[in-house]
Amino acid sequence: MRLIPVLTALLVMATLYLVVLEREALMRFAQGETVTLQELNPLAPDPASDPAPDPAARTDPSPEADATALAADAAQPAETREAEETQEAQVVSVVALRSVAREIDSAVRLRGETAAARAVDLRAETAGLVISEPRRKGALVEAGDMLCRLDPGAREATLSETRARLAEAQARVPEARARLAEAEARLVEAQLNATAAARLSEGGFASETRVASTRAAVRSAEAGVESARSQLETVKANIQGAEAAVDSAETEMARLEIAAPFAGLLESDTAELGSLLQPGELCAKVIGLDPIKVVAFVPETEVDRVAVGARAGARLVSGRDLTGEVTFLSRSADPVTRTFRVEITVPNPDLSVRDGQTAEILIEAEGAMAHLLPQSALTLNDAGTLGVRVAREGVARFVPVTLLRDTTTGVWVGGLPDEAAVIVLGQEYVTDGVPVEVTWQEAMQ
């Protein structure tokens, strides 16, 4: 009775072996085809591989038969090597695209925003109450329009006082000049008297006392001249001080009126009537929108292709197109983003373009020859270089490329010859030197 479970297990194992490992032979056997024992059991000896010895063959002493056998034995290793080499150099089927280079406008594409060409915050330079009616934001203003007027208070009296002091100082000028002229005349008289006394003293007609007296008079006259000159300089200094005081008072009066420095648009309400403005407080904000700037930042890889004066276009998110030219390109990179600021000036006479609108920007640059390829054709080599694989002389080759533009229909790349067979399907399964069998695809338009 114990033999039955063992036989059952062996039968199950044989069935599983046939179903799993020899399923194909079992199916042919089930369909009535002839199946050899070797197909059902690979371990069984193959009669065909060990045929019975042929007496005629053993007794054939022909030298031609021996030569034929030796040649067959010598040729067998060469055929085996050729088969192995053919297996190693297996041809890979790929799909390629016959691409022809075309010249494109390789404009620099950026993303930026519009910005007011001029903007200023008008702030009070002195304290005072606002005595002018406010103007509301959005209003157009011309250069010189009054925006805020402050109460002068005692400033007008201060200005009048300084002007009076200036007039008084100026009135003292003639008197000081007259005193100087008088002192100079006395000096001349004293010098003549001293000369006469000295000559008389030489002839014995004047005493030494008189000579000394005349010399003292000369010294006194010289001191009088210096004093008169000092008084005149003092009067002139007083005049300059009075003029400075007048200028200060007039400047303080001018600070009471805050006017628009240029034509533009009020971005905020002006200060309310009756409010007290302290130095530094905001009166109004004025922006100039004609012309308007479009500001963007150029990466290091593209900055050499942008030049001041180049034509540029911008498209707002609303779909409106703008045209202008590059008026500024920064010479210093942003320390964080390593990009360079570029500004495009665009006419805006109707002020319809607002400050801060997003824009897609194209800056004119020299044209370049490029190929339009599907983005999936791009690949990387082992060094991480971006490129494509091309079919050249029946084998695959890697060619580095430069990405020029990304569009909805494909990518424009440079770096390829004028005509190239670019592999667009199967490029990830081949390397340099691998034989390929090419199936051609229609070129992209």
Image: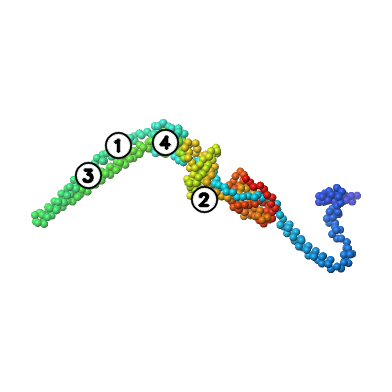
Q: Observer-nearest residue: 258 or 232? A: 258
Note whether residue 427 is visible.
yes
Residue 434: x percent and y percent? 68, 56
Residue 394 image-quadrant placement: bottom right
In this figure, which residue is indicated by the disc labeled 2?
Answer: 304
- Of circles 1 and 3, the one toward us is 3
Image side of residue 116 versus residue 206, left or right: right
Q: Where is residue 400 in the image (x, y as percent from the top left)?
A: 61, 53
Kind of residue sitting beneath label 1:
Glu
| Marks 1 and 4, how far apart at CA | 35 Å
For label 1, the SS is helix
Identify the residue under disc 3. 177
Q: Which of marks 3 and 4 is in front?
A: 4
Residue at numbered disc 1: 161
Task: Tell me the distance, in whole angstroms, between the alpha carbons under discs 2 and 1.
Answer: 64 Å
Disc 4 marks which residue?
142
Residue 403 vs residue 292: left or right? right
Q: Earlier in the sequence, mark 2 or mark 1?
A: 1
Task: Look at 86% across and 54% down and name the residue there.
Answer: 37
Q: What amino acid type should be assigned to the residue bearing mark 2?
A: Asp
Of the pair 145 and 165, the residue shown nearer to us: 145
